[in-house]
Amino acid sequence: MPSDLEDIRAAFEHQIALYGSVLVPDDSAPAPVADLAEPEAVTQPIAASAPIAPATRQTDQYSQINALIPADSPLLGMTSLEEVAHYVAHTKLIELDNSRQNPVFGAGHPTADLMVVGDAPGAEEDEKGDPFIGPAGQKLTQILKAIGFDREQVYITDVLKSRPPGDEHPTAEEFRGHLPILYKQISLIRPKLILCLGKTAGTVLLGLDTTLGAMRGTFHDYHGIPVLVTYHPAALLRNPNWRRPTWEDVQILRKKYDELTAS
Ligand code: URA
């Protein structure tokens, strides 16, 4: 939907202007391919190979992201995830907030080094108020396990905190309405690394207007935070051919994580 993408781009022009160059992934030998359906067969985390680049950990990078929140939003001054979750649960920011059973705020470690971002909750998530607990969530759990993470170690959320009725593709306006919540979550959690699941999450967060194929396989610099975009786990359920590229992506993710958390 090109007009939606244009909308998103226009809304985030100011942040696009802040993007630096694409971070170049390590060019070490490709790791073995494993079937993401069988995490137990998969390798250990890849060892750290490089120090943290100081430029990627400037203390003000999260303030920069916080500053993307509109000045008239109460989110701007909030200082804890609990406060934000309470606000989200009790505030109707967009039309979708009226039809949800529960807000799906996010779950996991409140200061996780790795943040995982999907697009929008589905039926199971809406029923329980937890992200990624349906079939796509089980696939995500498997993917994370395959690279040595428990769900509790990372922070998992979606751009949109309310389920679109009928799982319709959300509009750019809907994403825009909830995006400041994600900015706030990033600024409070302070992840060293972000994984976007699917083209939509990559498009909305990074302001990119391109194919998933063009987005994936390399790190994007989001205010100094490396962001990797890969296939959405729901896509892997539909097409097993995408497991292999996803596996390649999450291996470079793990390697980058180890580098960034080495000290
Ligand atoms: N798909 C998503 O993007 N998020 C969920 O929470 C569930 C499915």
Image (spheres, rainbow, N blue to C red):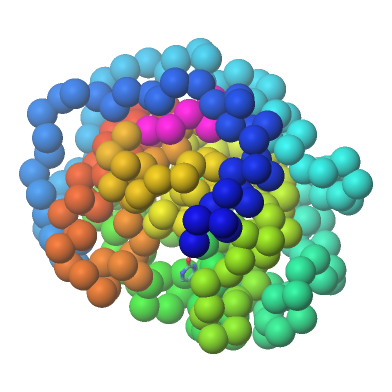
Residue occupying the point 32% across, 34% down: 218
**Residue 33: % across, % down:** 10, 49
- In-front residue for pair 6/197: 6
**Residue 242: % across, % down:** 20, 60
Give the left or right position of residue 5, taking residue 73 as reference: left
Residue occupying the point 80% across, 66% down: 93
The answer to whether one can see residue 7 in this image is yes
Q: Quadrant of the C terminus?
A: top left
- Above or below for 62 versus 107: above
- Above or below for 180 versus 53: below
Residue occupying the point 36% across, 42% down: 215
- Above or below for 130 versus 173: below
**Residue 56: % across, % down:** 51, 21
The answer to whether one can see residue 152 in this image is no
How would you classify the magenta stretch by its main secondary structure? strand
Residue occupying the point 26% across, 67% down: 236
Give yes or no for residue 223 being in the magenta stretch. yes
- In-front residue for pair 16/161: 16
The quarter of the displayed image where residue 177 is located: bottom right
Residue that extends furthest to the front in the rendered view of this protein: 3
Magenta span of residues: 219-224
Give the left or right position of residue 24, taking residue 16 as reference: left
- In-front residue for pair 114/75: 75
Give the left or right position of residue 107, taking residue 40 as reference: right
Give yes or no for residue 222 being in the magenta stretch. yes
Give the left or right position of residue 154, taking residue 144 as reference: right
- Above or below for 181 versus 129: above
